[in-house]
Amino acid sequence: MEHAMPRSAGHESLDQMLSVFGATPVVTDPSQLRAAETATFEIHRTIPMIVRPETREQVQECVRAANRERIAIYPVSTGKNWGYGSSVPTADRCVLVDLSRMNRILDFNEKLGYVTVEPGVTQRQLYQFLQDKGSRLWMDATGSSPDCSVIGNTVERGFGHTVYGDHFANVCGLEVVLPSGELLHTGFGGLPGANATEVYRWGAGPSLDGLFSQSNFGIVTRMTIWLMPAPEYFQAYFFQSSEEDSLAGFIEALRPLRMDGTLRSTVHIANDYKVLNGIQQFPWQEQMPLSRETMKRYQKTLKFGRWSGSGALYGSKGQVAEAAKRVRRALTGRVSKLEFLDDHRLAVAARFARPYRWITGWDLSRTLELVRPVYGLMKGVPTDATMASAYWRKKTPPPASPDPNRDGCGLIWYAPVAPADGGSVTTLVRIAEDTLLDHGFEPMISLTMIAERSVACVISIAYDRDVPGEDSKAITCYEELSHRLTSRGYYPYRLGIQSMSLLDSDRSRSEFLTSLKKSLDPNNVLSPGRYLTSEAGDRR
Amino acid sequence: MEHAMPRSAGHESLDQMLSVFGATPVVTDPSQLRAAETATFEIHRTIPMIVRPETREQVQECVRAANRERIAIYPVSTGKNWGYGSSVPTADRCVLVDLSRMNRILDFNEKLGYVTVEPGVTQRQLYQFLQDKGSRLWMDATGSSPDCSVIGNTVERGFGHTVYGDHFANVCGLEVVLPSGELLHTGFGGLPGANATEVYRWGAGPSLDGLFSQSNFGIVTRMTIWLMPAPEYFQAYFFQSSEEDSLAGFIEALRPLRMDGTLRSTVHIANDYKVLNGIQQFPWQEQMPLSRETMKRYQKTLKFGRWSGSGALYGSKGQVAEAAKRVRRALTGRVSKLEFLDDHRLAVAARFARPYRWITGWDLSRTLELVRPVYGLMKGVPTDATMASAYWRKKTPPPASPDPNRDGCGLIWYAPVAPADGGSVTTLVRIAEDTLLDHGFEPMISLTMIAERSVACVISIAYDRDVPGEDSKAITCYEELSHRLTSRGYYPYRLGIQSMSLLDSDRSRSEFLTSLKKSLDPNNVLSPGRYLTSEAGDRR
């Protein structure tokens, strides 16, 4: 790469490298390095060393050292970027900067509803913090591991399930270590004594927050996260339909409610494969991939639909009742089942699960086990139940402490965005399902009505990395999927580390970003190739 | 200025200049140039020429010509940046690029609720467009002139009165002419055939929209504006209190409703001076400035409070009723008056205005005249009623076609942000009122609960520019106000052209912006000094 490609780190001896980062703790243990090089799909990147700064000052030191020595560095918060590359860098031979030790909660305001955190703060930690404080505020949790970083997910523009589900839309006041080692505060953050840093997003002058999401322009070392007040009343709704073509109707029926503010949080719709993936591992008595006919059988036996949806209502009893009435009206005639669930009903169900089974033979407690994590996510409670789905095609059950990297779980996520239009979403899903089935994978798909007008679709390619040939089959499928979808105008909201060139067709944008990158990081030491490919990086 | 300061335009003869911009229409008529150099406060900038591009290609040509000839250019949409500098550039001898002829509405989608416009599209034009289409969508209008540009207000991060009141938070898909003359599309906009450009804000990779708000990094030539669906039912609420210290209570009572989603739109609170300013011109029989005691008299006579608030509820009848109940509960005991108004009540009041006056002697139609524009703004209807307030201290009444620049209206706006905390807002208002009174001006203040956690305060210094000495008195007052407020941590959300150095105390940020600017605009031809002062621009 011509653009000031940093000397690759391996050119020095380990001893030389060790001295570079001064007082910052380093890891050189080969087994830890190999673990950090492992994702949930095949990717080859050598990580010569991991540094684990404990303070912002150490992050600054690392960045300065990297510039001095022309060593590429690659920060991760906790490295739990499952399905998109875990902790593996976009370029070979980067020193990994693991920020997980910077895990302080620096500020908390119950009245104004925010918390200021460092990148090592996990979902679990933040949740526990709020519990310990007896806070009436809810975080928003993404359905990934409770051990994933709140900042990490937010700068990747991940999403969750409450009113604050669009994570990056609900933060402000970033502190960023620039590639130069200098500090930058966004919004009002750098102004002496500013009162509104934590509560007003824009500040004055150019708004810079967006520059540091999905980018390699800086390392976010601090961020204020807005928290929603726990509502007086909460009610979840679940719906399903066995009709193939009911999906378009769901979108058409719910979009107006999303747009008029009746539905203030994301709505989640899963196809049958996705639900089965949530319930159990691959049923090995069946042929691979599970055909649509087989799935119909499972829909009947396990009582789920071709499409299953969920969402939640937040407010006073009266507000929720009014919203529920509107949801019911919108979905009537479109669903085979629509149920509302609140804390009271959930508690009653749990109490009667055992006698219920005794009388009816139906294991209600199993149903509850499935519903609880989803229900919890809609209240901002992180769950570890979803991690099991990465073990879909493993022959052994998910372990108590799941680690998809370690356990050879194959998982590639691809997440295109569509307008909240029934026809457009249906086309997207059809292409995705056909492509995965063509390549021998079960098309597990969820659709999230992430904002008023748009739907984010998450497609999982799940397989067993320990089966020879599957890694390359999965990548072939992924590439074909990406090709078919982008050629129809469906672009992903987020990129895996193997696919950073996906946006290169927008040449003006690539040139613009490259020019920014050269200005901010002339030695190209920070996460080379992240959301900015070498091809673009090369150009002068 | 050392940083590649463009040759100032006046160094050529007009003939030479004329040829520079090729086919783009130019204006050299001295009276039009002088008009463009005039703001609502004293500021001296010579504008040697105005160019009026009609297409994006002409904008690109202008930018390229500016680079070739090292001429500084300064784009304005329609130049109605009242109180912050009108159309006057931040630097002397810039060629004004007037974008008002680029006034096409390029795309419109009733179902997904958006419109794509050029910078010359005015509030009036967009409103009329929606009326003509028989659309069920509402725009959000700012309380400035109907002839102000929708894009202009949005890139300055102005705000309005509906659910979509935070303008910049409700747009996406910007098309930008960069200082190089190249085009850039934000979000998914530059990707071939992208489906979600108009509906999904972030795109993939770094989010760049914010860079082009309050900045001199590019010229926005196209933008998609989201529109809210007209609610089934609309109800406005008005409240007031004569108690000095009720302001803090209002903020404390309403913030929880803003945070829990009961209040989805901005709440507007005005002090007594602001209300009087909305009703009439300066009462010349009184002493200047109007004292607090005098104001108490006016509060009684004209039946307004020390603090008057308004806001609106949007939804189904049931949703609005529930929200109204919560508003009533929150404000009970804090207000001397709380009224709800809907279309039906407004129509009835209008029908009975004449007999009502005949019976009671109270001119209800006068009240309606005052209420209607505010009521309309809450439904996204632009109004020209607010322009009259700029004529506060003029001795002649506001003309039918108001033009504050032309008519010597003195008006300086200063708009600091506070957390939505009763104590903090009260402190801010106290400082502002004291400072203006100390300097002989009536402190006209509005507070807008612009987002869940923050309040934007707009302070007007209104005077008569034709009275000798007033211009400099106003600037002195402004500077003192800015000094007192920033030293207490209250920074403005937006800067007037005379105050672009206000954020210089954040040196890291200035350096960061300067480095971006040098990279994007090496010849510094685009709006030199706009949100980036020469002091910072100088530094190497």
Image (spheres, coloured by chain):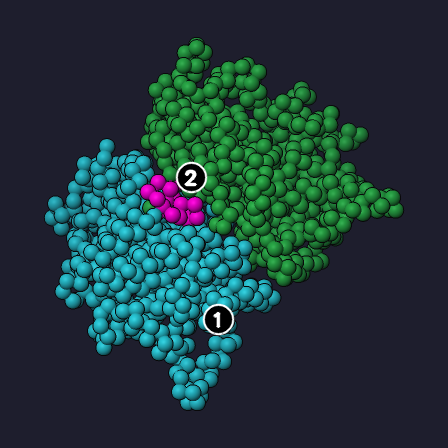
Chain colours: A green, B cyan
Instruction: Give the amino acid at mark 2.
Output: Leu
Task: Please name the residue that numbered disc 1 is placed on.
Answer: B338
Residue A529, located in which quarter of the rendered image? top left
Q: Are marks 1 and 2 on the same chain?
A: no
B533 or B35, which is in the foreground?
B533
Asked whether, in this view, residue B387 is left or right of residue A15, the answer is: left
Q: x, y (%) of residue A307?
A: 69, 46
Q: Is residue A375 above or below residue B280?
A: above
Q: x, y (%) of residue B264?
A: 50, 58
Q: x, y (%) of residue B391?
A: 26, 69
Q: Which mark is residue A174?
A: 2
Q: Is residue A233 above or below residue B402?
A: above
Q: Which residues are magenta?
A: A186-203
Q: Are marks 1 and 2 in contact (CB under 8 Å)?
A: no
Instruction: Give the amino acid at mark 1.
Output: Leu
Q: Tell me the mark number nearer the camera, choosing from 1 and 2.
A: 1
Q: x, y (%) of residue A279?
A: 73, 37
**Host chain of mark 1:** B
A134 or A287, which is in the foreground?
A134
Q: Is residue A405 above or below residue A251?
A: above
Q: Write the residue at 54% across / 55% down.
A: B260
Asked whether, in this view, residue A372 is left or right of residue A502, the answer is: right
